[in-house]
Amino acid sequence: MKRGLLDLLIALAIFALGLWQNLAYVDSTKFHRDEARWIHRAHYLREAIHPLSHTWDDGYLPRGQPPLGSYLMGLGLVVQGRDLNTNGLWDFNKNTAWNRSRGRMPVKADLVAARRTDAVVGALLAVTLYFLGKRLGNRLAGLVAALVLIPHPLNIYLSSLAGSDALLALLVALAALVAVSLADRPTWGRAILLGVLLGLGGATKLSPMLLTVPLAGIGVALLLHKLPERATGGGPSRQDQDMGWMLGSLPVVAFAVFVLCYPYLWPAPLERTKALFAFRAQEMESQGELWENLQVSGPADALARVNTTLGEKMTTSGRLAELADERFGFTWDAAWLDLALGTAGLGLLALLAVMYGLRSRYALGGIVLGGQAAIILLGMRADFARYHLPILVTLALGAGLLFGYGWVALRLLASRARALLRSRARGATQTAAPLSPEPAHPGRASVRPDAPDARPAPTVMASTTEPIAPSPAAPSHHPSPSPRTNPVASVRSRVSRILPGPLAGRR
């Protein structure tokens, strides 16, 4: 079976599994009042073709959330036969009964249609994670990453809820996949696509716009590579130079897409974008003050919250352990396993990024996906579960990479062990076999090599066209250190000997 066809079949199976599971929870997921606002803003899809309408005037609603998630809600409703005339605006200062009595609760059909839309997005996220794991590792890595994500309770919850969190995770994962592709083969088409995806991510939740900063920083570093040598004709290679310009253009492309998708910004793009980030930061602070039990005091506290949410409360391994207990009576506290495997795999990804450099697939893909997780940790002020989804995607990728590379290492070690056993078996057989005398040539008297008149065999001179290769010197057990030894190249060489399959030809 061709590899492309096999990947297609695996992707279809992952999509079907993810969609089946997400849809199974659409009716049972508890209603969240945020869903009412997302469905209310579905009419933004209609207003997108009227960018000068009063909908986009400066105010709380257009400033509160970027519009791409609302566009998605509107598109999902229309595709499923619903219209864009939905419920009224939910008032967070009033209770559910008050909002329901005033027509601000979504009708059942609209709520189910909006949730089905996110169920599809969640399934696409699992497929994207498969291809990302495959490109950074191997097919097993991608498969394990997707299978860690699909049954995760947080993924199920946000993929059966009307909102924009699943869309944000999908766009960031797609951006990481394109970044990996750009590292493998730098083209302007891929660079522009990466900028478009980051801009669309910004039009969903703002934060992906910040990812353009470290990527552009790498571009500048590539352009300035060996800068002092330019006076003597040195400088960056053509490939580094092209990649530098491509990465350096990302903030411009992303910002252009961000503004194009967001008519509220059109009157004053820079000024209103700055106001958006300031407003969002104020909102995060207010959320922490309003819900004191969820307030996050800083990055260290955010890490502790991640450990609690993704290492104790919501885990794939914990859910599987519960199923094993229900069906087979087997009890095992495995909730910690997700975080441990994911963290170890991300450490491996970081090692590969160091080994192969800033413009490698490991560095660019890791910066996009890991950078989004880092932004969330640094900016988290209230511990809402939905903020953890991009972190979960990153950890699922790490777990997949750990399994993928671990499997290759085990196969290699097993192969070397078998070869060693065969070599020892052949050596033992040759040692045990008796030496038989060489038969004499017929018609010629045999000559004993220890006879007094025995002459040495004539020396056969090698042809001048085929010089004799010198005998290899015995390896020294104490090689003298070279002053020009590159420690990164040395580590890369050692790791490549351990894992030659996935690392062969990869940068």
Image (cartoon, rainbow, N blue to C red):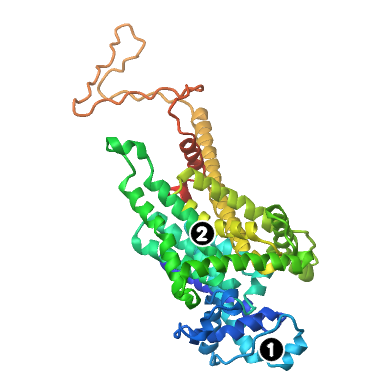
Amino acid type at image mark 2: Leu
Q: Which mark is residue 211?
A: 2
**Which quarter of the image is occupied by the N terminus?**
bottom left
Amino acid type at image mark 1: Met
Q: Residues within 10 Å of mark 2 (few under 14, many from 20)?
A: many
Kindly identify the residue that appears in the image at 47 percent across and 83 percent down.
48
76 is higher (above) or lower (below) than 382: below
Q: Quadrant of residue 469?
A: top left
Q: In the structure shown, which secondary structural element does the residue marked by tag 1 occupy?
A: loop
Q: Residue furthest left?
A: 464
Kindly identify the residue that appears in the image at 61 percent across and 84 percent down.
39
Image coordinates of residue 252 in percent, x first then y, are: 41, 62
218 is higher (above) or lower (below) than 234: below
Image coordinates of residue 428 in percent, x first then y, are: 53, 32
Image coordinates of residue 240 in percent, x first then y, are: 36, 48
- Whether label 1 touches label 2, CB < 8 Å: no
**Residue named by callout 1:** 105
Task: Tell me, yes or no, if residue 1 can be seen here.
Answer: no
Q: Residues within 10 Å of mark 1 (few under 14, many from 20)?
A: many
Earlier in the chain: of badge 1 and badge 2, it is 1
Closest to the observer: 240 or 335? 240
Calculate the distance from the C-alpha at mark 1 to the C-alpha at mark 2: 36 Å
Q: Quadrant of residue 194?
A: bottom left
297 is higher (above) or lower (below) than 385: above
Image coordinates of residue 465 in percent, x first then y, are: 19, 29
Kindly identify the residue that appears in the image at 70 percent across and 67 percent down.
286
Q: In the structure shown, which secondary structural element does the residue marked by tag 2 occupy?
A: helix
